[in-house]
Image (cartoon, rainbow, N blue to C red):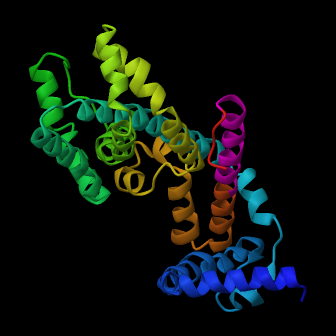
Amino acid sequence: MTGRAAGRTGKFLGKVRRQKFYLLALIPLFGYLVLFKYYPMYGAVIAFKNFSFKKGILGSDWAGLKYFKMFLGSADLKMVMRNTLAMSALSIVFVTVFSIALAVLISDLRSLAFKKIAQTISYLPHFISWVVIAGMAMTLFSIDGGPVNGALQALGILKAPVNFLNAGNIWGTLTGLNVWKSIGWNSIIYIAAIASIDPQMYESAIIDGAGKLKQIFYITLPTIVPTIVILFIFSLGYILNAGFEQQFFLKNPVNYTRIETLDTYVFRYGIQKLMYSYGAAVGIMKSAVGFALVVLTNMFTRKFFKMGIF
């Protein structure tokens, strides 16, 4: 070993000795990642096999790309992809817009006590299970005596009850539920970004005669653009994750053709119909497309906005 290599090794070992307690503290985290995140990836190989419980993963016969081709040639492909992309895109756009709006409104509150109350109230829906929300939705939007239909008819907005959970309205209903559930939690990062803005910028704008709207559009929003872009890139990576619980619990024979997504499709074929290899293949394709979208979006934002996550 040369003197330069020995010096680098000595420096590295010195850093390890100085940070040994931090490194020891990381061992449980690495153990968790290996055991629950990386080790299960071994099971993804069944997407390329005719999986049989009797033969096991290693003993099952290879099927190649059979199940990938089966999904791409499936009559359900167009329906499932349409529903997944539409509901996911609606959720990303509206949750992002309303989260930013909520963050701006909360940041402008002058009363610290009222600000804390508003934040707490907006966060609470995030912790409610989709099982509970689905039950609430079926009660609130019921066509037979539901309070939403009753209120809208009493106000003269509706002449007859509307089925908000049918095929024609389910996308809008689910988007509204996603917004209500998510904006409080998602606004936390935007509130933190707004809090980091130099107050002198607002003071200068006030001196120049800028009103509240001009301060928002010329100071607040441009300053938090990097945060918006980064979160948007991450969101696109999950665009094929339109959700599972909300669709699964609100799905019925009336809205089935508009609410079936990739996740519920994988559950139906991979678990309920015991087509494990087919379900695994669809899941791998979904993950691959999500990764590709993150990379492409990052390249786009780096080229046009000079920012990205890597």
View extreme (top): residue: 209
Tell which of 110 and 269 is nearer to you: 110
Q: Main secondary structure of the magenta part?
A: helix
User: Is residue 75 shown to the viewer in this render?
Assistant: no
Rendered location of residue 16, percent (x, y): 61, 84
Residue drawn at the location 76% of the way across and 84% of the way down: 9
Q: Bounds of the magenta span? A: 288-305
Tell which of 306 and 93 is nearer to you: 306
Q: Is residue 62 left or right of residue 169?
A: right
Residue drawn at the location 49% of the way across and 81% of the way down: 22
In this view, 48 is above or below 99: below
Q: Is residue 28 left or right of residue 278?
A: left
In this view, 261 is above or below 78: below
View extreme (right): residue: 2
Rendered location of residue 169, percent (x, y): 37, 32
Q: Within the magenta stretch, is there residue 205?
A: no
Task: Point out the image quarter for the N terminus.
Answer: bottom right
Rendered location of residue 166, percent (x, y): 36, 37
In this view, 210 is above or below 203: above
In this view, 232 is above or below 286: above
Residue drawn at the location 18% of the way across and 49% of the way down: 120
Q: Is residue 102 left or right of residue 16?
A: left
Tell which of 169 and 96 is nearer to you: 96
Q: Is residue 66 left or right of residue 293?
A: right
Query: Which image quarter: residue 31?
Result: bottom right
Residue drawn at the location 14% of the way across and 22% of the way down: 153
